[in-house]
Image (cartoon, rainbow, N blue to C red):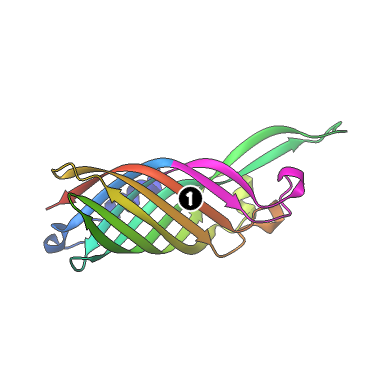
Amino acid sequence: MRWFMIVAAGLLLPVPATVQGQVALTVTVGPSLVTLTDDETPWSLNGEAPWSLYGGAVGIFAGFPISDRWGIEVGGVLSIKGKYEEYDTEGCEYGCVVSSSRDIPFFESTILADRRVELGSHGLHLLAGAFLGYAHGGHPVIDMIERFDFGVAGGARFDVGLGGRLEPSLSMLYTHGLRNIGDDVGFGATRALNLSIGLSHSID
């Protein structure tokens, strides 16, 4: 959460006052579906891949318009993109018992091109760009994987447009990792789909 708060402040501090009047700040929260592609994952069903898990994500995004139809959106997301399970193998004749399970949290920063489409009083944002992720936490398995993840990202956000400065929104963001983050512990490349609800606020 400390990383999330640092990015939230950093998104606005470097922006000059003349530009801040055009910034749209969006906070989102929602579930995610993460797929890891390594077929050697020891806890995949019957040794088959890919395998998936459910997690969650919270994000903050700042949109900067560069024309009536185009803009740039930068953001930070704190999400669960992996899970490590430890097994009790003692006396394990027909199967092993999970003794503990730990989520692998990632902090991700995104930079996305924003194609804006007006739909009456509503707004649609078509987003595409790149992400850089960093696994953080104190669990030993994190030291066994590649902490940095990177890849491409794309999605859409729909602003409901109820009037006023504070607007509800619905969004979808898909990230496609381009590296295997930990073959030794059964982590392959990450594929994550975040579905979120949020609030957008226009800053004068």
Give the image quarter of residue 112.
bottom left
Please tell me which residue lies in front, 203 or 145: 203
Q: Residue at x 19, y 56 (%)?
A: 23
Viewed as shown, does residue 122 lie left or right of 145? Answer: left
Identify which amino acid the numbered label 1 is placed on.
Leu
Q: Residue furthest front?
A: 120
Residue 175 place in picture, x, y as percent: 48, 57
Residue 120 seen by the camera: yes
Q: Residue at left 16%, top 51%? A: 203
User: Would you say 128 lies left or right of 191 here?
Assistant: left
Q: Nearer the viewer, residue 45 or 5?
A: 45
Q: Secondary structure at mark 1?
A: strand
Disc 1 crowd rating (10 Å Cα; few below 14, some 14-19, many 20+) is many
In the rendered image, the quadrant that contains the N terminus is top left
Q: Is residue 104 left or right of residue 201?
A: right
Q: On the image, which quarter does residue 127 sit in?
A: bottom left
Question: Could you tell me residue 79's position as x and y percent?
Answer: 47, 46
Q: Which residues are magenta?
A: 31-57
Residue nearest the viewer, comparing 156 with 14: 156
Residue at 44% x, 61% y: name it.
153
Residue at position x 55%, y 57% in the image:
147
- Is residue 38 part of the magenta span, yes or no? yes
Give the total number of marks visible in the rendering: 1
In percent of width and height, residue 177 lies at: 53, 61
Q: Is residue 101 above or below residue 35?
A: above
Q: Where residue 84 sits: x, y (%)?
A: 64, 43
User: Would you say residue 14 is visible in this rendering?
Assistant: no
Residue position for label 1: 193
Q: Is residue 133 magenta?
A: no
Could you say which is closer to the camera, residue 37 or residue 92? Answer: 37
